[in-house]
Image: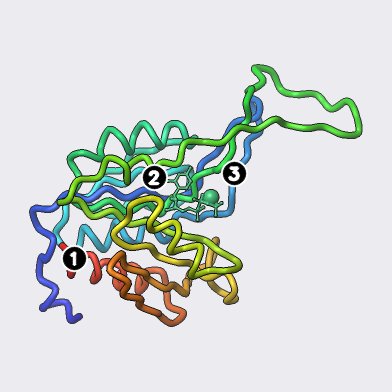
Amino acid sequence: VKFSERGLALSGKKALVSAGPTYEAIDPVRFIGNHSSGKMGYAIAAQLKELGADVTLISGPCALKNPEGVLKISVTSAAEMLVACEEHFQAADIVVMSAAVADYTPINVATQKIKKKENEFAIELKKTVDILATLGAKKSEQQLLIGFALETNNELENAKDKLIRKNLDFIVLNSMQDKGAGFATDTNKVTIIERSGNIHEFSLKSKEEVAEDICSIIVNLS
Ligand code: CTP
Ligand code: CA
């Protein structure tokens, strides 16, 4: 799509994007995190803004510059991300959950630094709330809800299952099988599966280009 043709396809629309990892505290100095850089979500937020949308970005801890004109809300844990997403969900026409939300969080957070003692040490974890599924259950007909799936095996089948289970309009399957795709890289290789059954396969591209592909499908469905 040429820049001139793109115009302001999403002006008047409100978008909500989540990005980055979450950090789940173990004690005051330690946490459970992941390698998400936030690049994919920030690129999507920037692209939606460029297309004219009013964009709110809910970001876990990462070292990226806030895209110009985007309202950024910084959060740390999955629980905080849930609260911020729920707060902004109703007003949003387009919601893209690209954050790498922790699946488990420590049951107890020590108030003091945990000292080393035994040779073995275990941390008890409990499941976090699935933010995307929570939003999917509340979604109205007018809202577009987009999720990601990170898979290493049975990729298509697992992604389709998430699409249905979480009530999404489309899901972006991140292939981890390709070198140069996934976390902490500048490129991604994705397959987009629409609720309608349409499947779009893309080549290995920069995350900015992947954001353009994702947003052009958003524009088509808006
Ligand atoms: N997600 C979320 N809240 C969680 C976990 C995941 O909103 N607590 C969202 C992610 O932002 C992503 C989608 O759900 O858009 C899929 O994440 P993924 O980790 O691939 O799938 P899970 O459902 O967590 O299942 P699993 O990790 O077991 O594959
Ligand atoms: Ca997960």
* Callout 1 secondary element: helix
Q: Residue drawn at (18%, 70%), measured in percent from left and top?
A: 220
Q: CA distance from mark 2 to mark 3?
A: 21 Å
Name the residue type under label 1. Leu
Q: Are the two marked residues, 1 and 2, in contact with CB atoms closer than 8 angstroms?
A: no
Q: Is mark 2 within 8 Å of ligand 1?
A: yes
Residue 89 appears in which quarter of the rendering?
A: top left
* Callout 3 secondary element: loop
128 or 209, nearer to the observer: 128
Give how far across and how far down residue 50 sits, in percent: 20, 63
Residue 176 appears in which quarter of the rendering?
A: bottom right
Q: Which is more N-terminal, label 3 or label 2?
A: 3
* Callout 2 secondary element: helix
Q: Which mark is residue 133?
A: 2
Name the residue type under label 2. Ala
Q: Is mark 1 within 8 Å of ligand 1?
A: no
Q: Residue drawn at (48%, 67%), measured in percent from left and top?
A: 174
Mark nearer the viewer, 2 or 3: 2
Q: Which mark is residue 221?
A: 1
